[in-house]
């Protein structure tokens, strides 16, 4: 009580002068030193615990369906090398055997995910000869922590010999007893060496079979699913037995037909490389064609609206065209008769067309001249039949022209020979010209001021000098 009351009364009493501050400073220093020592001791303890933990044994739990006559102290092996011991065997709440394995380094620990454990036996002669065979998981897999658990999906038990023997019934046991009783005769004599050699070869095979059966035991779910699926498939095939027999028969016939065509098949296979090379070239051209057609395909969406409008208008057009097509179909018999009558005219028409082609080729210069002089011909005919429709006009008024045509053989004799001269009979009123045999189109009238006549289409066809001169308008 005196110790507890001292601190309560100390703040009330005045401390001696000059002593209070020094006492508080000494107490703070001592507290700081005590706190630092405590932290140092705690860190050392943690380091010791960590080092002790890291140097301690690594434990792993393996869950088996049954312990398989394992005992404490049994070996844990990896690839035939002892790496640990069985430190404890227990039972879980769901009735599984919990085998605790303790390792002491040896470069095996820590183990990784994917590790598998199997109960193995050295032989069938003893009981305490079982051990756990470990298959470590890949080093790239996650690490299994200390006191980790391998579930039953990663463990495999062992089948005891008495369990195997219990599977035999009475007759099988008698046969097995007889076999064992006669084994002396089997192993004796010259056949023993061959039997021993067979058994030596049988051991690895049995090991492989055991590994396969272990894999099947590990994949019980998949095996069960496979068996059930196979059963359903077999039942379905049995239900379709007739169809299956027919399929087999047809398959046999197909194979036989293919066998009969083996020469054709051989020829086709021999030509296949050439065909494939040509196909490769075709595909190359096709790729280029696709590249060329791609712009057109881009334009296809834009043709949608016009095509839609065209199709909308096509329906009424077809409705209106139906009577026309009906009438045309009614005219087809008469047209067929007419076309049938054209058959006999083929040869005469062909000959006539050939002759017409030759005549047209020869008359081409004449037709060309007629095309050029057609306006002069038409005007001459109309003026001659209907009178002078129009006449020339100059500053003195209207005037007319008189054309006199004479055969050149008659020119030297008679009155025309006296009248036809190169000089003007009446200057400005009556002139004569001769030898006008190549006038140009439009030369029957005086030349127009704009030069529209006479027209000279071909210098070799006409002579502009043979036309009416411009002087007739200025007498």
Image: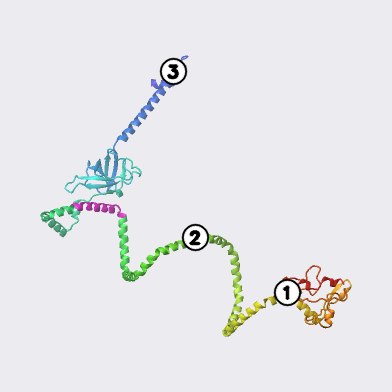
Give coordinates of residue 415: x percent, y percent: 84, 82
Q: x%, y% of residue 8? A: 43, 21
Residue 445 among magenta residues: no
What residue is disc 2 on?
287
Q: Residues within 10 Å of mark 2 (few under 14, many from 20)?
A: few
> Is 99 placed above or below 255 here?
above
Residue at numbered disc 1: 372
Does any portion of residue 96 appear in the rendered image? no
Position of 397 with respect to 353 (left or right) is right
Q: Are marks 3 and 2 in contact (CB under 8 Å)?
A: no
Residue 444 position (above or below residue 76): below
Characterize the local packing of mark 1: few (<14), some (14-19) or many (20 or more) Cα atoms within 10 angstroms. some
- Looking at the image, residue 370 sits to the left or right of residue 72; the answer is right
- The mark that comes first in sequence, 2 or 1, is 2
Spatial distance from mark 2 to mark 1, Cα to Cα? 59 Å
* Residue extending furthest toward the front: 412
Residue at numbered disc 3: 23
Could you tell me which residue is drawn at 60 percent across and 71 percent down?
Answer: 314
* Main secondary structure of the magenta stretch: helix
Q: Earlier in the sequence, mark 3 or mark 2?
A: 3
In the image, residue 129 above or below residue 7: below
For mark 3, does the 10 Å Cα neighbourhood hold few (<14), some (14 to 19), or many (20 or more) residues? few
Toward the viewer: 443 or 388? Answer: 443
Q: From which residue to which does the magenta span run?
A: 200-221
> Residue at left 61%, top 76%?
321
């Amino acid at each position: 009580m005196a110790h507890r009351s001292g601190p309560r009364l100390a703040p009330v009493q005045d401390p001696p002068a000059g002593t209070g501050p020094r006492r508080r400073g000494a107490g703070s220093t001592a507290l700081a030193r005590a706190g630092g020592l405590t932290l140092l001791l705690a860190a050392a303890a943690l380091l010791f615990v960590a080092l002790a933990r890291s140097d301690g044994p690594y434990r792993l739990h393996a869950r088996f369906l049954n312990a398989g006559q394992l005992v404490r102290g049994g070996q844990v092996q990896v690839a035939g090398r002892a790496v640990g011991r069985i430190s404890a065997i227990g039972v879980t709440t769901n009735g599984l055997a919990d085998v605790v394995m303790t390792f002491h380094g040896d470069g095996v620990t820590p183990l990784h995910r994917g590790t598998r454990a199997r109960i193995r036996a050295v032989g069938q002669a003893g009981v305490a000869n079982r051990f756990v065979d470990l298959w470590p998981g890949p080093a790239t897999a996650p690490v299994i922590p200390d006191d980790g658990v391998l579930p039953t999906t990663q463990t495999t038990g062992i089948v005891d010999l008495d369990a195997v023997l219990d599977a035999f019934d009475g007759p099988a046991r008698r046969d097995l007893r007889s076999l064992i009783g006669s084994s002396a005769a089997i192993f004796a004599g010259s056949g023993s060496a061959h039997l021993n050699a067979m058994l030596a070869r049988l051991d690895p095979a049995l090991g492989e079979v055991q590994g396969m059966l272990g894999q099947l035991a590990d994949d019980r779910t998949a095996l069960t699913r496979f068996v059930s699926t196979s059963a359903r498939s077999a039942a379905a095939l049995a239900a379709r037995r007739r169809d299956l027999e027919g399929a087999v028969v047809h398959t046999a016939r197909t194979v036989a037909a293919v066998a009969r065509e083996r020469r054709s098949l051989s020829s086709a296979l021999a030509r296949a490389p050439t065909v494939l090379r040509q196909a490769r070239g075709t595909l190359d051209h096709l790729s280029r064609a696709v590249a060329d057609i791609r712009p057109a395909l881009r334009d296809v969406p834009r043709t949608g609206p016009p095509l839609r409008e065209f199709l909308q208008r096509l329906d009424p057009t077809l409705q209106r065209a139906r009577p026309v097509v009906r009438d045309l179909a009614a005219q087809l018999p008469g047209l067929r008769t007419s076309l049938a009558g054209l058959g006999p005219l083929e040869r005469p028409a062909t000959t006539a067309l050939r002759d017409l082609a030759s005549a047209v080729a020869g008359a081409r210069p004449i037709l060309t001249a007629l095309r050029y002089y057609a306006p002069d011909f038409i005007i001459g005919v109309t003026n001659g039949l209907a009178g002078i429709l129009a006449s020339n006009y100059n500053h003195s008024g209207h005037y007319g022209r008189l054309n006199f045509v004479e055969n050149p053989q008659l020119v030297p004799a008679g009155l025309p020979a006296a009248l036809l001269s190169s000089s003007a009979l009446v200057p400005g009123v009556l002139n004569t010209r001769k030898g006008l045999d190549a006038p140009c189109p439009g030369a029957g009238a005086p030349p127009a001021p704009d030069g529209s006549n006479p027209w000279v289409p071909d210098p070799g066809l006409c002579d502009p000098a043979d036309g009416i001169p411009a002087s007739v308008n200025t007498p």
